[in-house]
Amino acid sequence: MVEAELLTYRETVKEIARRAEDLAASWRDEPSVDVARRAGLAWADPTGFRASLLATDRRLLEMQRIIRAIDDVHDALSPEVARLMELVFFQRRSVDICARLLCVDRATIYRWRKGIVAAVAGRLGWQ
């Protein structure tokens, strides 16, 4: 599960932007907002309504939590392991290519990769 999240990192970042944009625009499609606005209710404020949607959307919040965890782990890694994370998970390079680019053996690549996955899982509480 963690590896899948790492492999879909870039797509998840795009999905967060798309989801936030959809939620921000969704107030126009909500008939209850028009009714509330005509009734003078406080939550009829479109800005407040959009902010409320963005702050409470569970799917969006979970995607943001996962991306934050991946970013935090990446920032805490040594430069070599961070580069491996980028190569393996974001650029989807093979173990052999990563080993050649980083001038380490395959066993080191597997060990570092396992450590990255464990660190992200720990950050997310998915152990």
Image (cartoon, grey):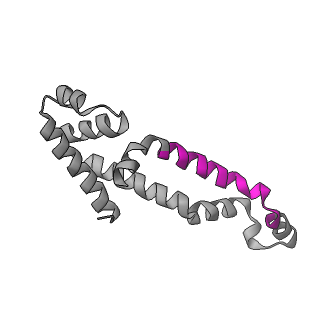
Look at the image and tell me in which quarter the N terminus lies: bottom left
Most foreground residue, 20 or 46:
20
Range drawn in magenta: 12-33
**Which residue is outermost to the right?**
38
User: Residue sitting at 54 percent across and 46 percent down?
Assistant: 15
User: Residue sitting at 63 percent across and 65 percent down?
Assistant: 52
Residue 41 position (above or below residue 94): below
User: Residue sitting at 66 percent across and 50 percent down?
Assistant: 22
In the figure, residue 105 lies in which quadrant? Answer: top left
Q: In the image, residue 59 lies at what x, y percent?
A: 54, 60
Q: In the image, residue 98 lies at what x, y percent?
A: 23, 31
Q: In the image, residue 84 lies at what x, y percent?
A: 24, 37
Give left or right: position of 29 versus 77: right
Q: Is residue 56 magenta?
A: no
On the question of residue 45 being in view, the answer is: yes
Q: Is residue 32 magenta?
A: yes
Give left or right: position of 8 versus 27: left
Most foreground residue, 105 or 102:
105
Q: In the image, residue 125 lies at what x, y percent?
A: 33, 66
